[in-house]
């Protein structure tokens, strides 16, 4: 099946190529979809008859389940494929896997993959819409969109907001997507972490480097706290987890020195007691669970727009037929 050109193009590979208008369109389209998840019958017929394959070649809890809920709440038919248990484990390539799925007449592929560029590689080779659910260290666009929606809920706007991303920025696709998306919508982004975990030359992306976590806490309106991605580290980037927590961990003791109450985000999964203490993660200024709730609405919006849907008063009831 041939995917149609939409307000977002054929695929959502990252936020880097999107304009401010396209980002705003996704966030605005997500708004009415929030309410669908609060209904007793959590379903609208917007993607009835569409078939979506979720190809998850890396572990995921939030993103995989959130995409599946989004698809089901839009009435799409969904199939989940993991590397384990599929013919990928016998050596079949990504493109051959997707082409075989297309031979069964699918419409969209949602892909998580350990290699940066995997989503674009696939999108360039198949006719179905491709949505990047996280590719290596490159981008995790729907995570950044849900972060932005959550910040917009909290502050009313993104323009002028100061968001500090704290932690393992080097290995983080979440950081990259947040930097592209937030700066394009007028927010200021700071990055903070051990110098071994900050990409060299990151200032060229228009961000402020905050060398100490105390600097980030003084500067920011919100902190987006990142996990140390030990699974992607090929060398000793930090002396120890205990040392990392002592120097960069977000604790209530540190936050008490902030000039204002900081909103706390974390994309999950969290390592409590390493990058964030439990009383902060579960505290009154944490929006970590609202982020997860917004993830479903954002993913509904992305899937709806890529399928050619138009935002408007009808979308959360009937949508496009
Ligand atoms: N935030 C995020 O991508 O979480 P999962 O790895 O659980 O999907």
Image (cartoon, rainbow, N blue to C red):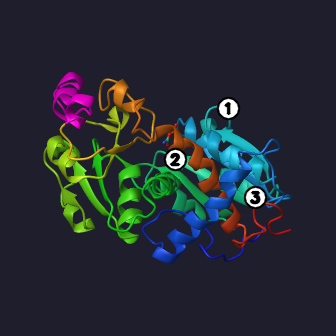
Q: Are marks 3 and 2 in contact (CB under 8 Å)?
A: no
Which residue occupies 32% across, 27% down? 277
- Frontmost of labels 1 and 2 is 2
Residue at the spot of label 1: 85
Q: Position of residue 280 (x, y in %)?
A: 35, 31
- In the rendered image, the vertical position of residue 215 relative to residue 270, given as above or below: below
Residue at the spot of label 2: 113
Q: Is mark 3 within 8 Å of ligand 1?
A: no
Which segment did they paint magenta? Answer: 236-256
Element type where label 2 sits in the image: strand
Q: CA distance from mark 3 to mark 1?
A: 19 Å
Which of the 4 image quadrants contains residue 160? bottom left
Which residue occupies 68% across, 56% down? 33
Residue at the spot of label 3: 102
Q: Are marks 3 and 1 in contact (CB under 8 Å)?
A: no
Is 43 on the left-hand or right-hand side of 296?
right
- Frontmost of labels 3 and 2 is 2
Q: Quick one: label 3 or label 1, which is nearer the N terminus?
A: 1
Which residue occupies 52% across, 70% down? 24
């Amino acid at each position: 099946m041939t995917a149609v050109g939409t307000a977002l193009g054929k695929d959502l590979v990252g936020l880097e190529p999107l304009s401010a208008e396209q980002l705003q369109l996704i966030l605005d389209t997500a708004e009415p979809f929030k309410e669908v998840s609060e209904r007793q019958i959590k379903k609208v017929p917007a993607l009835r008859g569409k078939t979506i394959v979720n190809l998850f070649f890396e572990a995921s809890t939030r993103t995989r389940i959130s995409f599946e809920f989004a698809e089901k709440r839009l009435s799409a038919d969904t199939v989940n494929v993991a590397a384990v248990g599929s013919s990928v484990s016998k050596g079949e390539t990504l493109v051959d896997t997707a082409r075989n799925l297309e031979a069964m007449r699918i419409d969209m592929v949602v892909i998580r993959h350990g290699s940066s560029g995997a989503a674009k590689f696939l999108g360039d080779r198949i006719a179905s819409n491709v949505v990047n659910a996280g590719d290596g260290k490159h981008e995790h666009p729907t995570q950044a969109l849900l972060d932005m929606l959550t910040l917009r809920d909290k502050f009313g706007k993104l323009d002028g907001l100061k968001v500090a991303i704290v932690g393992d920025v080097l290995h983080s696709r979440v950081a990259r997507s947040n930097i592209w998306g937030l700066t394009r919508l007028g927010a200021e982004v700071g990055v903070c972490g051990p110098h071994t975990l900050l990409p060299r030359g990151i200032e060229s992306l228009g961000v402020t480097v905050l060398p100490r976590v105390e600097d980030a806490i003084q500067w920011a309106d919100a902190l987006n706290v990142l996990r140390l991605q030990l699974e992607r580290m090929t060398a000793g980037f930090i002396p120890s987890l205990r040392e990392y927590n002592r120097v960069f961990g977000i604790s209530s003791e540190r936050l008490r020195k902030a000039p204002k109450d900081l909103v706390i985000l974390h994309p999950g999964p969290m390592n409590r007691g390493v990058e964030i203490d439990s009383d902060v993660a579960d505290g009154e200024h944490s929006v970590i669970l609202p982020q997860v709730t917004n993830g479903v609405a954002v993913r509904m919006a992305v899937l709806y727009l890529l399928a050619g849907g138009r935002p408007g008063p009808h979308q959360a009831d009937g949508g496009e037929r």
